[in-house]
Amino acid sequence: MTLGWDYPLPCRPQRAGADPYTHRLVGVLKLELKGITKRFGSLVANDHIDLVVEPGQVHCLLGENGAGKSTLMNVLYGLYDPTEGEILVDGKPVVFKDPGEAMAAGIGMVHQHFMLIPVFTVAENVALGNETTKAAGLLNLEATREKIRRISDQYGFDVDPDAMVEDLPVGVQQRVEIIKALVRDAEVLILDEPTAVLTPQETDELLDIIRQLKRDGKSIVFISHKLREVKAISDTITVIRRGKVVGQADPTASPTELASAMVGRTVSLTLDKAPAKTGEVTFKVRNLTVTDHNGQHVVDDLSFDIAKGEVLAIAGVQGNGQTELTEAILGVQPHVAGSITLDGEELLGKSVKHVLGAGVGFVPEDRTLDGLVGTFTISENMILDLYDKAPFARGVGMKPGVIADNAARKVEEFDVRTPSVSAAVGTLSGGNQQKVVLARELSRPLRLFIASQPTRGLDVGSIEFVHKRVIAERDHGTPVMIVSTELDEVLQLADRIAVLYRGRLVGIVPATTSRDVLGLMMAGVPAAEAEASASAHASGATTTAAVSEPAGHEGESHV
Amino acid sequence: MSATTQSPAGKQPGTGKGTGKTTGANRAGSRGGTTELVSWKAGVGLGLLAILGTVLFGFLANTKSAGFRIAEARDPNASSTAAWITLAVALAAAAYVGFRWISQRREGGGVDRWIPATTIAAIVVLGLAALGVARVEKITVPSMVFGWICSVLLLALAAYACFLTVQRRKVPAWVGGSFAVVFLAGFMIWIVAGGRDPEPSISLAGLMAGAVTLAVPLVFGSLSGVLCERAGVVNIAIEGQLLLGAFSAAVVATVTGNVYAGLFSAAVAGALVSLVLAVVSIKYLVNQIIVGVVLNVLISGLTSFLFSTLLTADPEHLNKPGRLQAVDIPFLADIPIIGPILFRQSLVGYLMYVAVIVVYVGLFHTKWGLRVRAVGEHPQAADTVGINVNRTRFINVLMGGAIAGIGGSFFTLVSVDAFSKDMSGGRGYIALAAMIFGRWNPIGAFLAALLFGFADNLQSIITIIGSPVPSQFMAMLPYALTVIAVAGLVGRSRPPAADGIPYVKG
């Protein structure tokens, strides 16, 4: 552990000025939101939200995707104007017209999608908007480099000020974002879904950094929907649902309680599934290699099998070749070598249409980009793959009646919440969109089912539904491949887990493997070594992975 | 930190080129066992050009010699002194830069980016000064012999590039650079030797000086493009800005009787065109390319209409602007060869040098430039650190328009002293090409514009001396070069990431 307190506390330069909020002491910034309401047209994203962030506290905002957490923070950060309500800093009302004013008041934000310019160096990114200049406006990056080195040393960040941001790993980019906020003397740091792109180990390091910041008197607003981290780090938890604060929770509350508060009804965090009844191996991948346009092997010599009636989950941090792997199977990757066979038939080099015709069902990772045509109706989206086949087509004509009937049946079966099957798919919520994709892909007789990030951005209810359908398909005897970056999802669905790191297979392990081991494997440590290292660390202090999850069986079915 | 799992952020060789589009840092890091996907583009491209060169310069060469006249000095004494001083300065500079290069190489680190280019520049100046000192007035080369020498060199370079590709190694930049120089030399010798005279010759200094002059509007146009596109607004309207600049310079200079008023009004006119572009595309989010094209058509029509109705009716009072005279810079203008090329320009020409330097330093070494580039790359990131994205874009587009307008005044105040219909003649589009070829960098755009100006001037000189190549082929050169540049033979030309994408908050 690199500790921050060996170093002198950062001294806030006393800024002169008549502003009510510039004369404050280190670490005593108290932030209050009173009755914040934000409407986008008829949509109420935030409905009279009250929130108090005490100095030196880690305050978690817990809520599902789309609950209004990010909107609230964007209001606080001056990116949106609130429709109603006020913000108080140390008891005095303030109005932030733009992020610059929010920063001047000591509020820093690390966005979910990093606000870094890839082709700038770390120093340039940190300097931007807060530049030190010599005469005639010439940049003085040396001063910025010095500040970066100081903060980097203080918190053990190990960031090179002259590195190009696009060359840095995601975890380091996140530290650059934190440095950006600290250089601007932020007292309140808002972290928006900071762990979404990190490995479990990187997450642990981030939580350590947050603890250090807290010791230095900073307050942290930690936005997340991941219960494990929220429980590990927070002092106070505020739960937000559908734009409203539904209550405060204590970090000691059980995950099931927190999840129920978040969703608004009792939910089951575990999935009931029977043990897999595996049959013969029908899907084989051998020495699959995918090369990108730079000549990098994004998928490197991958070999694995999937048997009938089992779920193989592909785990790994985003960007380690998962996308390319699924696309190679589907036939949309150009530079591929190796072999992919399904029931003995070679699929590599075949057209997408042929692959689909061979009985491959595919749920793409980005449903709005690859899964659906947003402006098409639900019924049209339901037959994107079968539009030219009976019973939906005759000759060159389509049969709208049959298509609409098909859609009506599927909407019923998959519980898609929509006013009409002729509504544009783009108007549906993420969960309902995903159900449309599933309905389409599962309606053909399948010999292989691939789902990539099947529950990304879905609410807890939809997640339960999607998971149940996936397991139902498995029990139907189909080989199933799930690609997910969420360890929770992997552990819930998988019968076996294959971990990818930089395009290579780190290993295939049983679903009973511990989170610690999987986390290390996701960072490229081979399975056996990971086992050893994880057991040595089992007594280690504060890993989130060590927080065990009670198996609550509230047994409520979906929605 | 417990169990640090960060992999060392190892940089691979050639990271600067290839990682532009990698998403997620995990891909950008080094990865063992990767094979570099070697492109055959360089090998095949150079090979084809080398064969073309061999056919033209070797097999199709004639027995005449090619003469290149070096300009005769106006004042031999002053010229001689200037030449000696330049020689000394260039020698010192070349020695210093060369020393830096070698010592940095020896320390094992990378060489500063500016060093190779500066060394080449210093050596070129050195050579030219030496010619001046030696009072060489004309270089005559036998075309057949030199044609074959060039052909062999070209084939050797192409073969080396192919050899490297087979060895799965990267083709270094100097191969392409020397190939271009040899090809150009062979081409010039071949084309001049093909002239009608028994002993054909051209004036080298005249060729270069003409190239710089013809490049002036292109440089202003491409700087305008750089300013706009670095901030994320595509400026197709350069053509219109040049044309309206030319028109208003002519009219205002005639009416006021003051060429400087004309120059100023050209800047205002260019900025006015930009104002429309900025308001419609930034505020009302209309597609920037469509607005640009529409503006070009609109201004072409407007100026043609006003020209044929008003200017032709009364040219005495509306279309007789007078000229901005060429001004010699004392001493510098006396340097042989270099002086007449660079330092006998009109005010607009000198403004061009100033503009290139100011835009370059501004964009890459000031607070303003950092913000502009941020806005063009990732406007949301700029917004979250308190930079007003659309205001930055607005101001940049206006400045770009003013610069292009000044470039337009070149047509009516320097080149010809009257406005005529559509007199910008598509140079706005060539300026756009120069900007892309110059990789959105003011200095690159300046050099690319010089190259295009060179091609333009070569074409007219060839027409005069008579040549085997139809001049229309030469007129194609700027466009052919751009196609090559964009096709990636020269390297990936990557625009600012947010170029052409309107920024809507929230």
Image (spheres, coloured by chain):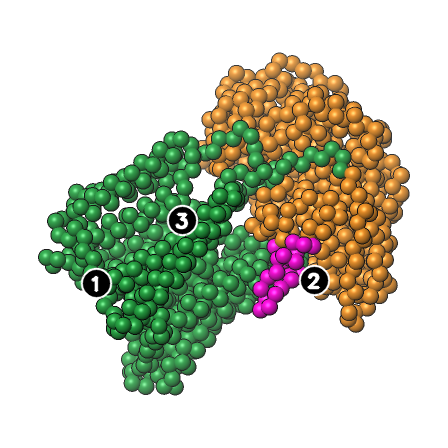
Chain colours: A orange, B green
Callout 3 and callout 1 share a chain: yes
Q: Amino acid at mark 1?
A: Glu
Pointers 3 and 1 in contact (CB under 8 A)? no
Mark 1 chain: B
Q: In the image, residue B478 lies at what x, y percent?
A: 33, 55
**Distance of label 2 from label 3 (alpha carbons):** 39 Å
Residue corresponding to mark 3: B486
**Distance of label 2 from label 1 (alpha carbons):** 64 Å
Residue corresponding to mark 1: B137
Q: Amino acid at mark 2?
A: Gly
Residue A28 vertical placement versus A63 (above, below): below
Task: Give A166 or A150, whichever is nearer the viewer.
Answer: A150
Residue corresponding to mark 2: A100
Q: What residue appears at the point 44 percent right and 54 percent down from the top-left corner? A: B97
Q: Amino acid at mark 3?
A: Val
Q: What residue appears at the point 21 percent right and 52 percent down from the top-left corner? A: B189
Callout 2 and callout 3 share a chain: no
What span is colored magenta in the figure?
A124-147
Q: Is A129 in the magenta?
A: yes
In this rendering, the label closer to the viewer, 3 or 1: 1
Q: In the rendered view, does B217 fall on the left or right side of B151?
A: right
**Distance of label 3 from label 1 (alpha carbons):** 40 Å
Residue A129 quadrant: bottom right
